[in-house]
Amino acid sequence: MDIASVKLAILFSGLLLGIVFGFACQRSRFCFLGVISDIYVYGNPGRLTLYLLTLITAVLGSQILIWYGFLNPIDSVYFNIKNQTVSCIFGGVLFGIGMTLCSGCTTSNLIKVGEGNIKSLLILILTGIVAISTMRGSLGVARVHILEDNFIIRKVNGFFELNDSLVSLVGPAFFLVLIIATFYILSKKSIDCKGNSIWGFIMGLCIVGAWFMSGNIGFIAEHPETLESKYLLTNSGRPESFSFIGPLVHSLEFFLYQSDSSKFISFGITILLGLLFGSFLSSFFQGRFKIEFFTTKSDFFYCAIGSSFMGIGGVTAFGCTLGHGLTGLSIGALNSIITVVSIIFGATLGIRHLENKVA
């Protein structure tokens, strides 16, 4: 298959995977913040079950790909941020607070846009603008000086950086804990897991499918022009699966600078567009498509602050709740585990703030 055909297959598969994931996500009401708030506020593990079933499907499928040589996880961005632990912690906490103030992370807001929510559209636009600035704008300069190019930060990162023998144990230990947690949740007879298992299985397979397309079909061992190995149509130049901070940035840049030859429609962008369309289809068939907007001035203020936090946090942490919480964890990346814990901590702080505000 020639390179042009491979690129077309990658873009089409990204769109299709995004549609399926968006449809399943909207239909199951999947939301990372919802998982945290349901447990923290109501003690209800229902959406946690959905998340765990999605994650364990993604883990098993990704490990099969790795076992048979269809995916090299070491090439992914999640295994190339070993010296960025402080950034992951700081960014994760900030992202967690931000998504609480916005009543949802980037994925959740994308789903809501598909349902007709104009408020979520504005949240995503502001998040993307701040993320662009944090990635390579004025905020990016501050990010590099404070969290990367800093003697103290390098020392702290060195403290967190484990040797290879310990890192090799992280993946198996995480997978064992995941399996135990899943079976514990499933053993609770009070939880109806039938619907969750179907949607969780579908969404987990989408994560695996994206890894396969970008990491295997899209991998060229020797590109005819450069004679070097290359991953086609990924903005990072590495194998990618579902994550929406980066694709949100690149989508806005492509829209604004389409005449720039360096901008292109990537695998991540097609997944993002597919997710929007999949959510729209699901909400339309359910009769849930409805135009909504901000309800109060306070709502607008919190969403503006939260969007900024998500834009800064998502770039600083090298991913969002979906990027680290499903994609990164599916290959057992240590910093994905650290980032997810940080996001949960930040979300808890945000929930407590809102509780105190209401009280």
Image (cartoon, rainbow, N blue to C red):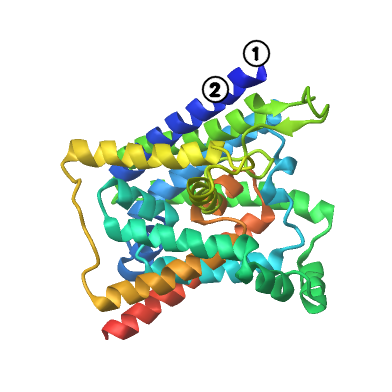
Viewer-proximal residue, 282 or 261?
Answer: 261
Q: Amino acid at mark 2?
A: Ala
> Could you tell me which residue is drawn at 71 percent across and 69 percent down?
144
Residue 174 in view, yes or no: yes
Above or below: residue 298 compared with residue 79: below
Q: Quadrant of residue 283?
A: top left
Query: What quarter of the picture does the C terminus occupy?
Result: bottom left
Q: Quadrant of residue 298?
A: bottom left
**Residue 171, horizontal then vertical, whole percent:** 68, 48
Q: Amino acid at mark 1?
A: Met
Where is residue 241 shown, x and y percent of the image? 56, 40
Q: Is residue 240 left or right of residue 290?
A: right
Q: Would residue 345 be found to the left or right of residue 212 on screen?
A: left
Q: Which mark is residue 9?
A: 2
Q: Which comes sooner in the sequence, label 1 or label 2?
A: 1
Which residue is denoted by mark 1 in the rendering? 1
Q: CA distance from mark 1 to mark 2?
A: 10 Å
Looking at the rendered structure, the secondary structure element under dot 1 is: loop
Give neighbour class at mark 2: few <14, some 14-19, many 20+ (Cα, 10 Å): some
Above or below, comparing residue 325 to residue 95 in the picture = above
Q: Residue at point 50% right, 32% down? A: 14
Residue 295 percent coordinates (x, y): 21, 69
Q: Is residue 25 left or right of residue 348?
A: left
Q: Residue at x 64, y 43 (%)?
A: 331
Residue 183: x and y, percent? 46, 46
- On-image quarter of the N terminus: top right
**Mark 1 touches mark 2? (CB < 8 Å):** yes
Outermost residue toward the front in this view? 259
Specify whether residue 341 is in view.
no
Which of 208/52 is in front?
Answer: 208
